[in-house]
Amino acid sequence: MDKNGFFRYFIYMITLIHIIQMVFQVYMLMLIVRILGSWIPELHNSRFMQFLSFYTDPYLNIFRKIIPPIAMIDLSPIVAFIMLSILENVLVRFIVMFFV
């Protein structure tokens, strides 16, 4: 592979990694807003919170089934964030290994 082809290949890899990281950051932000919004009862019926719930609750429910609330505190979002971060790192490392 010539220098120009390698450079183009490298740019594609970096772009793909940035897109993946951006998607994960947006989803984590959605999770944070959903979790904080759940503390404000007035927001429960808003269209925005319903939108966030539609996209975040299926993921959070996976961990809610495994980790029960302790003293009325839901700890499952903490595990959800950790798992999402691990998934992002594994995906990025896989892409780097695949492209190199």
Image: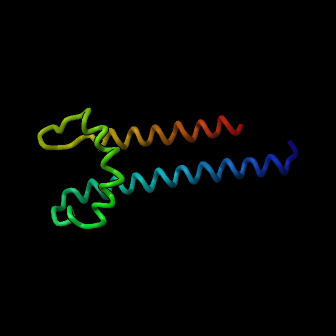
Q: Which quadrant of the view contains residue 61?
A: top left
The location of residue 79, given as percent across then percent down, is: 32, 38
Left or right: where 9 falls relative to 61? right
Give the answer, above or below, for where 39 lies relative to 93: below
Give the answer, above or below, for where 90 lies relative to 36: above
The location of residue 40, given as percent across then percent down, is: 18, 62
Give the answer, above or below, for where 22 lies relative to 97: below
The location of residue 43, given as percent across then percent down, is: 21, 65
Of all residues shown, which one is farthest toward the right?
2
Q: In which quadrant is the C terminus drawn?
A: top right
Q: In which quadrant is the N terminus drawn?
A: top right
Q: How many marks?
A: 0
Instruction: Give whichever of 59, 70 is nearer the camera.
Output: 59
The location of residue 18, given as percent across then percent down, is: 58, 53
Residue at image position (25%, 35%) is 65
Left or right: where 95 falls relative to 69? right
Residue at image position (11%, 40%) is 71
Residue at image position (35%, 44%) is 59
Of all residues shown, which one is farthest toward the top?
66
Give the answer, above or below, for where 75 lies relative to 47: above
Q: How is the image coloured?
A: rainbow
